[in-house]
Amino acid sequence: MIHPTLARLAKNREHLLEIVGDLPDRALDLRLEESWSIRQILTHLVNAEEDHRQIIEVIVNGDLDRLPAQVQLHEHNAARLAERGHLTHDELLAALNAQREQTIALFNSLSADQLAEVGPHPVMGEMSVVNIFRVIAMHEHTHARDIQAILTNAGL
């Protein structure tokens, strides 16, 4: 039986890919007013999943001193977007897939005790490892809605 958190990750990814899977590359630069473009949102999802996985690894390895006490989220996200640069549609889909494969592998490598470990999330405070995996799923769901709103506004 698949763990409910893995099922949620799969369901949310499937939904995201239904929305963006066939978009032409030029559509990725659509945005609502001053919000991020679809390309930036997808890049952000790649970055955030990687960042969350690193937080999980630090917690389960007991290296809590490697985590910043706080993160200025806006500045952090802007810097991470700049690091990855301008990715094409195919590059974004490949990066999303690679991150998810690593996330699932990490989840499957952890024991029930490790999933229950609690540690300091630099933005959200104390939370269990399994809840950080849940944040990945919720975060993707939220941004899939944002992308859908952009596409709806554009008549797509």
Image: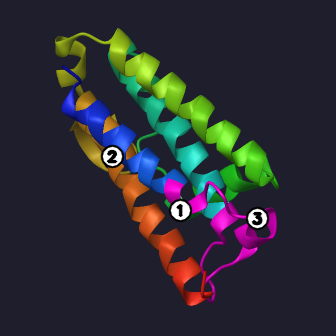
Magenta residues span 18-39
Q: How many C-alpha atoms fall within 10 Å of the one at disc 3: few (<14), some, or many (≥20)?
A: few
Measuring from the top left, give residue 32's x and y in whole percent: 60, 85
For label 1, count other residues whose C-alpha is less than 10 Å away and answer few (under 14), some (14-19) or many (20+).
some
Q: Amino acid at mark 1?
A: Ile
Residue 24, numbered label: 3
Q: Amino acid at mark 2?
A: Val
Up the image or down, 124 lies above or below 30; here it is above
Front of the two marks 2 and 3:
3
Q: Is residue 106 visible?
A: yes
Badge 1 is on which residue?
19
Q: What residue would you read off at disc 2?
A: 135
Q: CA distance from mark 1 to mark 2?
A: 20 Å
Foreground: disc 1 or disc 2: 1
Element at label 3:
loop
Residue at the image position 66 percent from the left and 58 percent from the top = 22
Relative to residue 149, is residue 12 drawn left or right? left
Q: Which residue lies at the image location 60% right of the left edge and 41% below the top edge?
A: 96
Which of the pair 37/54 is nearer the observer? 37
Image coordinates of residue 31 in percent, x first then y, are: 65, 80
Quarter of image, res 93: top right
Q: Answer with mark 1 or mark 3, whichever residue precedes in sequence.
A: 1
Sooner in the amino-acid sequence: mark 1 or mark 2: 1
User: How far apart are the alpha carbons under marks 2 and 3?
Assistant: 29 Å
Identify the secondary structure beneath mark 1.
Answer: helix
